Amino acid sequence: MREPAAPAAPPTPGRGGGAVDVLVAGGGPAGRALAAACARIGLRTALADPAPDRPWRATYAAWADELPVDLPAGVVAARAQGRAVALTEHRLGWEYTVLDTPALRAHLDAGLAGVAVHRAKVVGSEPGYARLAAGRLPARLVVDATGHRPARARRAPAEQTAYGLVVEETVAAPLVASGEALFMDWRQEHGRPGGAWPTFLYAVPLGGGRVLLEETSLARRPGLPLPELRARLHARLARHGVHPPAGAEEERVRFPVEGPVGATLAPGPAFGAAGALVHPATGFSVATALRLAPRLAEALAGPAPRRAARSVVWPAQARAVHVLRHRGLEALLRMPPARVPAFFEAFLGLPAHHRWAYLTGRADLPGTAAAMRALWARADWSLRARLVGPALLPRARPATTG
């Protein structure tokens, strides 16, 4: 969730005076990673954020093999073996990591030495300048890393929403064992009838003996309301005899899982969630941004930086994979609620290399296509009809019931 923007500070030039080479708009993980990468290779860099000191409260997670190899070990709060439940239980076979949010913030902040940080909101750009909510800032190139802005979409996007509680491991033990991560549990234990919009339990360790228990709506247009998710979570926990203590820490999640490539507040590149890097099937984007930031910085340092940036972040195969993933999203949005667990049963039953390609290979067009063909082959005819329909039909209409 975004806090109200703080008043913009008077603009000041970057190192050496005059226009900076790169102004990164947005101080989340993607924006800070890119600003640090640009400064590291000698670009005069500025970062604009209306609240640069605001703590990060989100939980960031990734598959271990997706993280940059040079990420300090202390940035990972917990490692666990992942499992999932659809109609039956599946071992995912990969290590799942939950990041230590303050440690990630400290790691990225350490790279901002020499970056001019402005307490300001970027609202657009013009040749040679970034337009701020109050004034202008000289900048040769502006990168939009401002995250999700609902007003950017012409129509309401599909959203992932979730409501969670943080409890001690001993409290969560009936649902998830120590050293495990329950990536998704689609069993209908949330106290709603079978025709209700499907949700699942996400239960992951946070480190320090704490576990996040979260009722999650993977995708809905618009997102399933948080009060409904809260009621479902408490019903599910009660069914397993799990009783969170009064005053348990809460987590509320709401963000789009779809967006057009190239939708941005400025003519320059977009990065992170603003640049449509969110995976529509998982909601993950931070590991992708951390890996791409150094490569994008190198592109911005060269000739024709806008074109070079696009070739780094959105090469042709990545754009094709983006389209295929969103076909998969449309299939899920149109799926009858009672069929969703069967859909994930088929997907989770695929060989690990197919699941890995679909969940992580953002530029692996052959792997993504092979995974979708394998899913088709594994599905029954009823499910196959649900998979092919979205390729022939317009976007699903917004949902009107829970």
Image: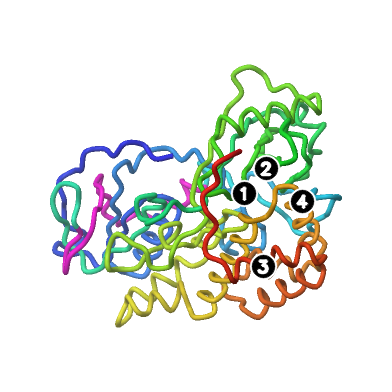
Task: Kindly indicate the quadrant of the structure image that contains residue 238.
Answer: top right
Please report whichever mark, 3 or 4, sits nearer to the chain's N-terminal start.
4
Check the picture and name the quadrant holding the N terminus. top left
Judge depth for marks 3 and 4 and give the one in front: 4
- SS at mark 2? loop
Which residue is denoted by mark 1 in the rendering? 218
Would you say the residues marked 1 and 2 are in contact, meaning their CB atoms lie under 8 Å apart?
A: yes
Residue 204 seen from this side: no
Check the picture and name the quadrant holding the C terminus. top right
Real-space Cα distance between discs 4 and 2? 10 Å
Would you say the residues marked 1 and 3 are in contact, meaning their CB atoms lie under 8 Å apart?
A: no
| Numbered label attached to residue 358 | 3
Would you say the residues marked 1 and 4 are in contact, meaning their CB atoms lie under 8 Å apart?
A: no
Judge depth for marks 1 and 3 and give the one in front: 1
Model colouring: rainbow
**Magenta stretch, residue numbers:** 104-130
Please report whichever mark, 4 or 2, sits nearer to the chain's N-terminal start.
2
Which residue is denoted by mark 4 in the rendering? 341
- SS at mark 4? helix
Residue 120 on the magenta span: yes
